[in-house]
Image (tube, rainbow, N blue to C red):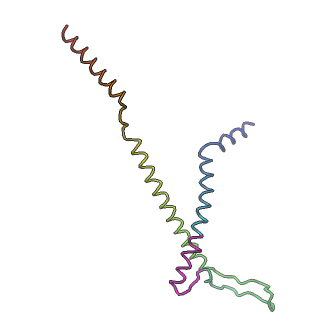
Amino acid sequence: MSLLKEFKDFAMRGNVIDMAVGVVIGAAFGKIVSSLVDDLIMPLVGVATGGMNFTDYKWVIQKAVMDGTEIIKPEVTLNWGTWIQTIVNFLIVAFCIFLAIKVMNRFRKQEEEAAAAPAEPTQEEVLLTEIRDLLKKQADAEGAAK
Protein backbone atom coordinates (compact mmCIF):
# COMPACT_ATOMS: atom_id res chain seq x y z
CA MET A 1 0.00 0.00 0.00
CA SER A 2 2.92 2.33 0.67
CA LEU A 3 4.14 2.01 -2.92
CA LEU A 4 0.72 3.04 -4.24
CA LYS A 5 0.66 6.08 -1.93
CA GLU A 6 4.17 7.09 -3.03
CA PHE A 7 3.16 6.80 -6.68
CA LYS A 8 0.04 8.90 -6.07
CA ASP A 9 2.12 11.58 -4.32
CA PHE A 10 4.59 11.54 -7.21
CA ALA A 11 1.92 11.69 -9.92
CA MET A 12 0.01 14.49 -8.25
CA ARG A 13 3.06 16.62 -7.62
CA GLY A 14 2.86 19.94 -9.46
CA ASN A 15 5.96 19.36 -11.58
CA VAL A 16 4.63 16.13 -13.07
CA ILE A 17 1.31 17.72 -13.98
CA ASP A 18 3.09 20.75 -15.45
CA MET A 19 5.30 18.42 -17.47
CA ALA A 20 2.28 16.49 -18.77
CA VAL A 21 0.60 19.73 -19.83
CA GLY A 22 3.84 20.79 -21.51
CA VAL A 23 4.06 17.52 -23.45
CA VAL A 24 0.46 17.84 -24.69
CA ILE A 25 0.92 21.48 -25.68
CA GLY A 26 4.30 20.65 -27.24
CA ALA A 27 2.72 17.92 -29.38
CA ALA A 28 0.02 20.31 -30.55
CA PHE A 29 2.63 23.01 -31.21
CA GLY A 30 4.70 20.49 -33.19
CA LYS A 31 1.70 19.70 -35.39
CA ILE A 32 1.12 23.39 -36.04
CA VAL A 33 4.75 23.94 -37.01
CA SER A 34 4.79 20.76 -39.11
CA SER A 35 1.77 22.06 -40.99
CA LEU A 36 3.54 25.40 -41.42
CA VAL A 37 6.53 23.63 -42.94
CA ASP A 38 4.61 21.08 -45.04
CA ASP A 39 1.79 23.31 -46.25
CA LEU A 40 3.38 26.75 -46.51
CA ILE A 41 7.16 26.79 -46.47
CA MET A 42 8.11 23.69 -48.47
CA PRO A 43 5.78 24.53 -51.39
CA LEU A 44 7.44 27.96 -51.55
CA VAL A 45 10.86 26.30 -51.45
CA GLY A 46 9.68 23.99 -54.23
CA VAL A 47 8.66 26.96 -56.38
CA ALA A 48 11.93 28.74 -55.62
CA THR A 49 13.89 25.65 -56.65
CA GLY A 50 11.96 25.13 -59.88
CA GLY A 51 9.18 22.84 -58.68
CA MET A 52 11.31 20.49 -56.59
CA ASN A 53 9.43 18.46 -54.02
CA PHE A 54 12.03 17.19 -51.61
CA THR A 55 9.96 14.24 -50.42
CA ASP A 56 10.10 12.73 -53.93
CA TYR A 57 13.90 12.52 -53.98
CA LYS A 58 15.48 9.20 -53.13
CA TRP A 59 18.34 6.92 -54.05
CA VAL A 60 17.24 3.50 -55.17
CA ILE A 61 19.59 0.89 -53.72
CA GLN A 62 17.72 -2.10 -55.04
CA LYS A 63 14.92 -1.99 -57.59
CA ALA A 64 11.61 -3.64 -56.88
CA VAL A 65 11.09 -7.19 -58.09
CA MET A 66 7.87 -7.31 -60.06
CA ASP A 67 5.81 -10.09 -61.60
CA GLY A 68 3.70 -8.20 -64.09
CA THR A 69 1.92 -5.58 -61.98
CA GLU A 70 2.37 -7.45 -58.71
CA ILE A 71 5.24 -6.37 -56.46
CA ILE A 72 7.09 -9.42 -55.19
CA LYS A 73 9.80 -7.49 -53.39
CA PRO A 74 9.53 -3.70 -52.88
CA GLU A 75 12.38 -1.40 -53.82
CA VAL A 76 14.93 -0.45 -51.20
CA THR A 77 15.59 3.30 -51.09
CA LEU A 78 17.37 5.99 -49.16
CA ASN A 79 14.78 8.77 -48.92
CA TRP A 80 17.17 11.71 -48.69
CA GLY A 81 14.48 14.23 -49.71
CA THR A 82 12.29 13.25 -46.77
CA TRP A 83 15.34 13.51 -44.54
CA ILE A 84 16.03 17.07 -45.81
CA GLN A 85 12.40 18.01 -45.19
CA THR A 86 12.62 16.57 -41.66
CA ILE A 87 15.76 18.63 -40.97
CA VAL A 88 14.05 21.81 -42.23
CA ASN A 89 11.02 20.94 -40.11
CA PHE A 90 13.23 20.47 -37.04
CA LEU A 91 15.05 23.76 -37.60
CA ILE A 92 11.77 25.65 -37.91
CA VAL A 93 10.32 23.95 -34.81
CA ALA A 94 13.50 24.72 -32.86
CA PHE A 95 13.43 28.34 -34.00
CA CYS A 96 9.74 28.72 -33.07
CA ILE A 97 10.37 27.22 -29.63
CA PHE A 98 13.37 29.54 -29.22
CA LEU A 99 11.16 32.55 -30.01
CA ALA A 100 8.41 31.36 -27.66
CA ILE A 101 10.88 30.86 -24.80
CA LYS A 102 12.48 34.23 -25.52
CA VAL A 103 9.08 35.95 -25.22
CA MET A 104 8.24 34.02 -22.03
CA ASN A 105 11.62 34.93 -20.50
CA ARG A 106 11.03 38.60 -21.34
CA PHE A 107 7.66 38.51 -19.56
CA ARG A 108 9.15 36.62 -16.61
CA LYS A 109 11.99 39.16 -16.35
CA GLN A 110 9.48 42.05 -16.36
CA GLU A 111 7.49 40.34 -13.61
CA GLU A 112 10.64 39.75 -11.54
CA GLU A 113 11.72 43.38 -11.97
CA ALA A 114 8.27 44.58 -10.94
CA ALA A 115 8.33 42.28 -7.91
CA ALA A 116 11.86 43.36 -6.99
CA ALA A 117 10.98 47.07 -7.02
CA PRO A 118 10.06 48.21 -3.53
CA ALA A 119 6.41 48.99 -3.16
CA GLU A 120 5.44 52.57 -2.38
CA PRO A 121 4.44 52.93 1.26
CA THR A 122 0.78 53.54 1.84
CA GLN A 123 -0.38 56.88 3.21
CA GLU A 124 -1.09 55.20 6.53
CA GLU A 125 2.49 53.88 6.71
CA VAL A 126 3.88 57.36 5.92
CA LEU A 127 1.80 58.91 8.72
CA LEU A 128 2.82 56.20 11.19
CA THR A 129 6.49 56.73 10.28
CA GLU A 130 6.15 60.47 10.87
CA ILE A 131 4.47 59.88 14.25
CA ARG A 132 7.23 57.44 15.23
CA ASP A 133 9.92 59.95 14.24
CA LEU A 134 8.18 62.75 16.20
CA LEU A 135 7.87 60.54 19.30
CA LYS A 136 11.54 59.59 18.98
CA LYS A 137 12.53 63.29 18.80
CA GLN A 138 10.43 64.06 21.85
CA ALA A 139 12.01 61.18 23.77
CA ASP A 140 15.49 62.32 22.73
CA ALA A 141 14.73 65.95 23.71
CA GLU A 142 13.39 64.87 27.14
CA GLY A 143 16.44 62.66 27.67
CA ALA A 144 18.81 65.53 26.81
CA ALA A 145 16.91 67.93 29.13
CA LYS A 146 17.37 65.68 32.19
Q: How many marks?
A: 0
Instruction: Farthest residue to the bottom: give it.
Output: 68
Relative height, residue 90 to residue 134 (above, below):
below
* Residue 49 on image: x %, y %: 51, 85
Instruction: Farthest residue to the left: give it.
Output: 145
Q: Quadrant of residue 14?
A: top right
- Considering depth in this image, is 33 or 132 the residue closer to the camera? 132
* Residue 44 on image: x %, y %: 53, 79
Residue shown at 52% from the left, 80% from the top: 45
Quadrant where the C terminus sits is top left
Dominant secondary-structure state across the stretch colored magenta: helix
- The range drawn in magenta is 35-54
Residue shown at 37% from the left, 27% from the top: 124
Relative height, residue 57 to residue 13 (above, below):
below
In the drawing, does residue 75 fall left or right of residue 68?
left
Quadrant where the N terminus sits is top right
- Considering depth in this image, is 96 or 54 the residue closer to the camera? 96
Relative height, residue 22 to residue 126 (above, below):
below
- Considering depth in this image, is 90 or 111 the residue closer to the camera? 111
In the drawing, does residue 34 fall left or right of residue 68?
left
* Residue 35 on image: x %, y %: 60, 70
Relative height, residue 89 to residue 26 (above, below):
below
